Image: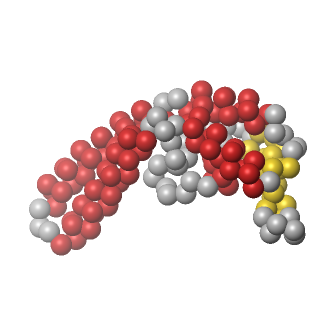
Amino acid sequence: MRNESLEKSVTKLNNDIAALTIAKKYLSNVDEINSVKESLNNKKQLLSNELYAEDYKSYSECRDAITELLDTTLEKEEQLKLLEMIKETFGRQYPNVNKKSSGLNVWLKELNLEYNWTHNEETGWYNLVITGFGLYKQS
């Protein structure tokens, strides 16, 4: 994916910031730790801005592709293809790099799509029917 390294960098910065928060409880140089945390947060914000910079364009591309799928029952294979298409279009694994959810349901919520899940008794799988588009707002 085109933004994989950016995504990994933001995740690493998140982990470093979390570690500093824990370290603050045990170390006496709180001011220095806060300064480093602030610097890391600034770097994270710059990388996040870059990561999300093309989201409206990506959303538009996804919307065009998803329009063809409206009111169509998507079974397992179609759902997997849809998820891969969305991830490739956005160029990242996670809709929100600060959260570690990357499944189809979380992407559908991020794209603010209207949809229903119906259980297929024969396969045990839940089929997806996308019924419409809500108002998209970038995270």
Residue 45 lies, in percent from the top left, at: 37, 40
Q: Does residue 19 appear in the picture of this structure?
A: yes
| The C terminus lies in quadrant | top right
Q: Would residue 52 appear left or right of 108 to someone viewing this image?
A: left
Residue 103 lies, in percent from the top left, at: 61, 55
> Can you name the residue that lies furthest to the bottom here?
26
- Most foreground residue, 47 or 72: 72
Asked where in the image residue 122 lies, by quadrant, the reply is: bottom right
Q: Would residue 81 appear left or right of 37 to someone viewing this image?
A: right
Residue 69 lies, in percent from the top left, at: 81, 39
Image point 55% across, 46% down: which residue?
95
Q: Would residue 54 appear left or right of 74 to someone viewing this image?
A: left
Image point 39% across, 40% down: which residue?
6
Image point 74% across, 44% down: which residue?
113
> Can you name the residue that lies furthest to the left here?
29
What colour scheme has been applied to the protein in the rendered image? secondary structure
- Most foreground residue, 31 or 10: 10
- Most foreground residue, 60 or 80: 80
- Most foreground residue, 23 or 88: 88
Q: Can you say whether 93 is above or below 126 in the image?
A: above
Q: Does residue 109 appear in the picture of this structure?
A: no
Question: Total of numbered circles in the picture?
Answer: 0
Q: Can you say whether 27 is above or below 33 in the image?
A: below
